[in-house]
Structure formats: C-alpha cells, structure tokens
C-alpha cells in the first residue's frame, strides 16, 4: 500500500541504565555449558549479542514509554491536543488491563477525543502500528498520531537463567530456551503527521506485508519463558522475507542498489547474515544495534532508525527500507524517504 500524505515527524527513545554483558550471563551458565559440552565462545559468536540493558528493579515500564513519547512530542513540535490516536505496541505487559496506551495517554495529557489502544504483532508490532496510523492519517481521520513501545527483558532473563542452570536441563530444552537470553530492553516513540502540518522531510512512502502462519507455534513467548524452534523459525522467516522483498520491489521499485540504508529488526548475527545473503543485499548498508542492545522486540526497528540518524548513517533524500519479521510468521517492509 502506498501513502501520499504521511510523514515521520520525530523519533525518540529511552535506554535502561544497566548494561549487562553476555559474559556475565555465561559465567552463571558455566556448569550447564560444561556438562552439555557447549563452548561459551561459540554460543556468543552465534548470537553476536555482546550486551543488553535492564531497567532498575521495580521500574514501572509504561512510564518509560511515556518518557520516550514526551521527548518525541517535544522534538516534533506537535502539541498534545493535536494527537488523534496513540497506539502502544509493547510485547512486555505488567498487567492485562488497562492498555499501556491508556497510561501514556494520561501521562501526556492527551485530549479525551484521542483514541488509545494496545495492538500486538510480536516483534513486528511497531511497524504494524505505523502502518495503521499512516492509513488513518492518509484517510483524513486524524492529523497526527503517536506510536509507543517499552520492553523489559529482566524478568524473562532471570527466570530463564534459573531454569537453564538446573541440574536436569538437557540439550534440547537448552536450545529451545536460549533465545530468551538475547532479549534486550528499551522504550521508543514515533510521531506521525499529515503532510499539511509536517515540518519534517521524512515521508513514509508505503508498506507491504506477507504472512505464513503455518509457523504460529514455532515461537511461544510468555512473561517468564520463551520457547523457540530457532532453526525452523529462522529458515521460515528468511524465506518469507525473500518473498516480501519481491513484493516491495514491485510496489516501490526497490533494487539492491537504490536503498541507501536497511533498518532491520535486530535478532542476532546468524539471522542477520543469512537474511542479507539470501536477499543479496550489502550488509554494510545496515546499521546494527543487536551487539549492544540485543533483540528489543518491536522497539528494535525504530530504535535502530533513531540511532542511525544520530550517527549520520542516514541523510536527507535517502531511500530507507524498514524490514521486520515477527513470530507467527509475519513480515513487513516499509519505505521512508529521509
């Protein structure tokens, strides 16, 4: 689907204060790794995640979404009363209700007319939120919208470490749970506007999506546990991404040369390498955050884009491809002309 009047007005993020090195996690796993014959160095190189971040214990995570959203609004110049909708896309939930969007709506003092709701689509949810918001803006339903996300990986990491250090853990179970230790934490927010009120050059061109839901049981995540068939999921995800790339090429005219920067969902080194090899893309055109942030779920793509902008990896006029795969499986690709 193509958009004609949608701009990404501003991005902002909030990072947790505690940096947790992968080496410190593997020290706790040392007895299990020795018993199962798994080289720690090999395991680290497989994921490529060298560190991730944790919030302070007791942090109310929706407040972190509010912090990022407040920064994004300030940078955008959009007044709170202009926001017509706020969507929260967080996978992490401290409670079933009310919605995280409701909490952020209150914190920011958004108008009562502004719709507020949570949406979920695994690691693809932020891109899905941008897609829905873009449609609303293009159709004239709202002039400006806010997409937020806040993730917390401390609880699942601690629970996973406890299980993986149990004396009866076996190799198949270890393999299914290991991916949970690559997860990171962070919060991010994006303000989207109609071109008539935009002061930004960052135009959202459009998006494409494809699904292969035969993989819907290959990654099952809970608050304190994530069970993943890593090999099957990676193979299926990259195959789906290959077909989605072909759709993006037909829709946007993408080629391997005319996209200046690829902003991808950051899973890890093995996934990143296979994806770029399969699509025949230049990996030097992709800014990486997984080595120092881990997999931050839905926050990964917008966080990576914000950091790429800060470090001058994108410049005005660049065609940028946002690409994500979410367990289920779903794949989305979006173009922004910066």
Image (tube, rainbow, N blue to C red):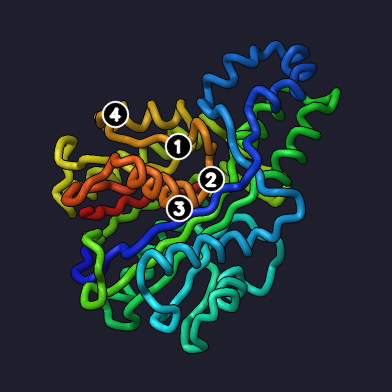
Above/below status of 131 relative to 336: below
Q: CA distance from mark 3 to mark 1?
A: 17 Å
Q: Earlier in the sequence, mark 2 or mark 3?
A: 3
Give the quadrant of residue 294: top right
Between disc 1 and disc 2, the foreground one is 1
Crowding at dot 1, Cα within 10 Å, few <14 / some 14-19 / many 20+, comes out as: many
* Residue placed under numbered mark 3 in the picture: 124
Between marks 4 and 1, how big is the CA–CA gap?
13 Å
Of marks 4 and 1, which one's residue comes earlier in the chain? 4
- Residue at image x 17%, y 45%? 254
Q: Which residue bears the numbered disc 2?
A: 296
Which disc number belongs to residue 284? Answer: 4
| SS category of the residue bearing label 2 | loop
Question: In the image, 101: left or right of 274?
Answer: right
Q: Position of residue 185 (x, y in %)?
A: 59, 46
Cα distance between the residues tagged 2 and 3? 11 Å
- Please tell me in which quadrant of the rendered image residue 141 appears: bottom left
328, above or below 73, in the image? above
Q: Earlier in the sequence, mark 2 or mark 4?
A: 4
Are there few (<14), some (14-19), or many (20+) residues within 10 Å of tag 2? many
Of the numbered discs 1 and 2, the one sitting upstream in the chain is 1
Instruction: Identify the mark at residue 289; answer none if there is no mark.
Output: 1
Please state which of the two labelled residues, at mark 2 or mark 3, is closer to the viewer: 2
């Amino acid at each position: 689907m193509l958009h004609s009047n949608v701009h990404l007005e501003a991005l902002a993020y909030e990072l947790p204060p505690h940096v947790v090195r992968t080496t410190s996690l593997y020290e706790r796993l040392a007895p299990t790794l020795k018993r199962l014959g798994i080289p720690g160095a090999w395991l680290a190189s497989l994921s490529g995640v060298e560190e991730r971040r944790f919030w302070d214990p007791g942090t109310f995570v929706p407040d972190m979404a509010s912090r990022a959203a407040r920064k994004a609004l300030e940078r955008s110049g959009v007044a709170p009363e202009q926001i017509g909708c706020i969507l929260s896309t967080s996978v992490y939930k401290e409670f079933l209700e009310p919605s995280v969007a409701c909490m952020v709506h209150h914190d920011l003092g958004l108008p009562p007319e502004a719709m507020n709701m949570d949406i979920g689509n695994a690691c693809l949810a932020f891109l899905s939120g941008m897609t829905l918001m873009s449609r609303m803006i293009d159709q004239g339903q709202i002039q400006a919208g806010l997409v937020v996300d806040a993730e917390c990986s401390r609880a699942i990491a601690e629970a996973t470490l406890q299980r993986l250090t149990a004396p009866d853990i076996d190799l198949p179970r270890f393999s299914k749970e290991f991916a949970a230790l690559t997860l990171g934490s962070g919060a991010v927010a994006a303000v989207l506007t109609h071109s008539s009120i935009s002061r930004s050059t960052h135009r959202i061109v459009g998006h494409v999506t494809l699904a292969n839901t035969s993989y819907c049981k290959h990654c099952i995540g809970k608050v304190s546990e994530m069970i993943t068939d890593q090999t099957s999921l990676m193979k299926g995800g990259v195959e789906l991404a290959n077909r989605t790339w072909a759709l993006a090429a037909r829709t946007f005219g993408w080629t391997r040369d005319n996209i200046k920067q690829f902003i991808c969902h950051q899973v890890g080194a093995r996934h990143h390498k296979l994806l770029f090899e399969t699509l025949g893309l230049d990996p030097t055109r992709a800014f990486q955050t997984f080595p120092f942030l881990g997999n931050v779920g839905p926050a990964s793509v917008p966080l990576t884009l914000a950091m790429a902008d800060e470090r001058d990896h994108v410049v005005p006029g660049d065609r940028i491809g946002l690409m994500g795969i979410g367990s289920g499986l779903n794949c989305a690709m979006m173009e922004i002309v910066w």
